[in-house]
Amino acid sequence: VRIIQDTIVVIVDKPVVANILAPFLVSKFKYANIFTISTMYIGLYEFEYPRGLSFSDIPRLSDPRWKPRNIPDFSPVQEIFSDRAVKLDISPTEILSKATQILFSSNMGSSGVIAFHTLISECLGAEHAKAEYKTIVTYSLAPDAIEASLKNLWSTKDSWYEQLLNTA
């Protein structure tokens, strides 16, 4: 008997979230290879607004794109084990292209939503960014809150996601 293993990829904002979620993800997806991608290493804008100006005062020159930050000894992709997350030296695009399921871990902030949307767009294409993805809502990283969230996954097709995406 051959067990087919899924490849689950969870997009998180920081590596510490991957470490906290690790035992819960392994418990929920027992027969899967689980990976996380942290969006911490990338950012849409790395500049300060001139005194007295806001984002709306700055002319838009092009669509936002990821600008890699220089964070020493940092790898955005991690493999999840029951007790830890281990850094891997592969690209987000490579692991996303192998995923059988992609989940989004969100604390319901607009910056996380735009980071997820942009990561999927840049790695898999604009059409994939419009697809539905299940979401682990992390208002709290307490064990009971994580378990409840994994039992009741939200969706990127729900109104909250579009509202936060449009806000960002």
Image: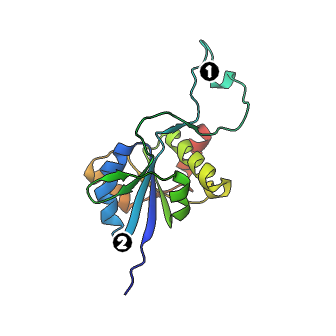
Q: Nearer the viewer, mark 2 or mark 1?
A: 2
Residue located at (56% from left, 61% from top): 97
The percent coordinates of residue 27 (x first, y second) are 30, 64
Q: Quadrant of residue 80?
A: bottom left
Q: Is residue 105 visible?
A: no
- In the displayed image of the protein, which residue is found farthest to the top? 51
Residue closer to the observer: 94 or 160: 94
Quick check: 48 above or below 82? Answer: above
Q: Is residue 168 left or right of residue 19?
A: right
Residue located at (67% from left, 57% from top): 127
- Report the amino acid beneath label 2: Tyr
What SS does tag 1 mark? Answer: loop
The percent coordinates of residue 103 (x first, y second) are 47, 57
The percent coordinates of residue 141 (x first, y second) are 31, 46
Give the labeled residue for mark 1: 54
Question: Disc 2 and disc 1: Cα gap in Å?
Answer: 48 Å
- In the displayed image of the protein, which residue is found farthest to the bottom? 1
